[in-house]
Image (cartoon, rainbow, N blue to C red):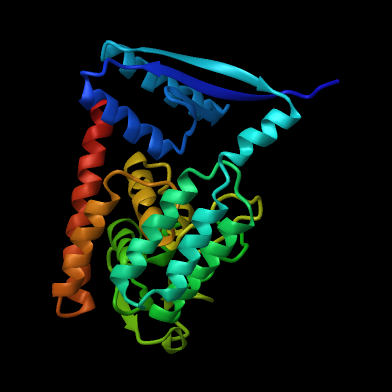
């Protein structure tokens, strides 16, 4: 019996005069990582999310006076293999790894390469060893720039009560960046309003009575779930530990922090937030002032997302 694998094809035509709609469609297809079978025919693996996305694009094409259909294709073994090869990103990852190895170790370069990696991952429908190799190369570059950057370890997240963490001293590495900024914000805003922060030159300087976060061996740091789920950054671990991840506004902020810290699925507003936080970091005289200013950014995001949720 021949085993068939299902794929999706978007078949479209658009009026030549509607250049704006054609450009929007091209950009959307590129962002999705669609393979082109021929002009006007685009392929994706059949999944619930890809089906919904292609159908939404088809609706946009029809609204622009074009024609569009989403077809289900049942491919046999040889056809499926051929289709999968259209989505092989090994060469793209190889080029990224080469760029990482030749890169100057500075924050701007690291952020750019992290965005490039995140964009590849977002369209990598069949992850293989090349993705892991690029992730490790990026982690090595990050470690050279920021010694002490945490490595995700397998561990369960325990539910904790904020009342048991009141008025504590919390410690993390100095020269705050996104995950540490956001983590310090959520600690002071929702977990321990009286928190006192220490900014460490090295994780080894953490006092035994302080609650460390975002470094290897800290009380709260990156976790790689045992079920092969995506890595959780420190902000996500804190939110889950104290039951804050059920708040839709916190969950949205978590997607931004995750994207900017370790990559993954791109988030529309992440680049803008990154630029704001980078500007604050460049101008703040110390980490206390940086946290105060960054906290206003996260306060604003939280308030805005809460209002958006109220209107839904």
Identify whether 94 is placed above or below 288.
Answer: above
The foreground one among 29 and 253 is 29
Query: How many dots with numbers?
Result: 0
- Residue that appears at 48% across and 43% down: 123
Q: Tell me if I can see residue 120 in this picture.
A: yes
- Residue that appears at 73% across and 23% down: 4
137 vs 181, left or right, is right
Q: Tell me if I can see residue 219 in this picture.
A: no
- Residue that appears at 48% across and 61% down: 95
Q: Quadrant of residue 156?
A: bottom right
Q: Position of residue 277 (x, y in %)?
A: 22, 63
Q: Position of residue 129 (x, y in %)?
A: 64, 57
Q: Position of residue 250 (x, y in %)?
A: 34, 47
15 vs 141, left or right, is left
Q: Quadrant of residue 162?
A: bottom left
In which quadrant of the rendered image does the C terminus lie? top left
């Amino acid at each position: 019996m021949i085993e068939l694998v299902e794929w999706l094809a978007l078949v479209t035509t658009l009026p030549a005069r509607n250049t704006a709609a054609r450009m929007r469609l091209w950009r959307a297809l590129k962002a999705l990582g669609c393979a082109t079978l021929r002009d006007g025919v685009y392929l994706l693996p059949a999944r619930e999310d890809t089906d919904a996305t292609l159908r939404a694009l088809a609706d946009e094409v029809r609204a622009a006076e074009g024609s569009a259909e989403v077809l289900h294709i049942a491919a046999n073994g040889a056809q499926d293999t051929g289709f999968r090869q259209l989505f092989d990103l090994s060469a793209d990852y190889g080029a990224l790894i080469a760029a990482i190895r030749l890169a100057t170790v500075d924050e701007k370069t690291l952020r750019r390469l992290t965005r490039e990696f995140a964009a590849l991952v977002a369209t990598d429908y069949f992850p293989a060893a090349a993705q892991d190799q690029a992730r490790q190369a990026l982690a090595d570059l990050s470690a050279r720039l920021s010694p002490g950057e945490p490595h995700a370890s397998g561990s369960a997240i325990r539910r904790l009560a904020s009342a048991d963490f009141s008025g504590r001293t919390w410690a993390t590495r100095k020269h705050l960046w996104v995950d540490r900024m956001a983590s310090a914000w959520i600690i002071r805003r929702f977990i321990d309003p009286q928190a006192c922060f220490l900014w460490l030159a090295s994780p080894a300087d953490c006092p035994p009575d302080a609650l460390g976060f975002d470094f290897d061996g800290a009380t709260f740091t990156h976790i790689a779930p045992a079920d092969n789920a995506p890595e959780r950054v420190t902000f996500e671990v804190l939110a889950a530990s104290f039951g804050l991840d059920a708040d839709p506004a916190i969950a949205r902020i978590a997607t931004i922090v995750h994207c900017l810290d370790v990559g993954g699925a791109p988030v529309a507003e992440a680049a803008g937030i990154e630029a704001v936080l980078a500007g604050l970091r460049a101008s703040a005289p110390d980490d206390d002032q940086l946290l105060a200013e960054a906290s206003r950014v996260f306060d604003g995001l939280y308030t805005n997302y809460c209002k958006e949720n109220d209107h839904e």
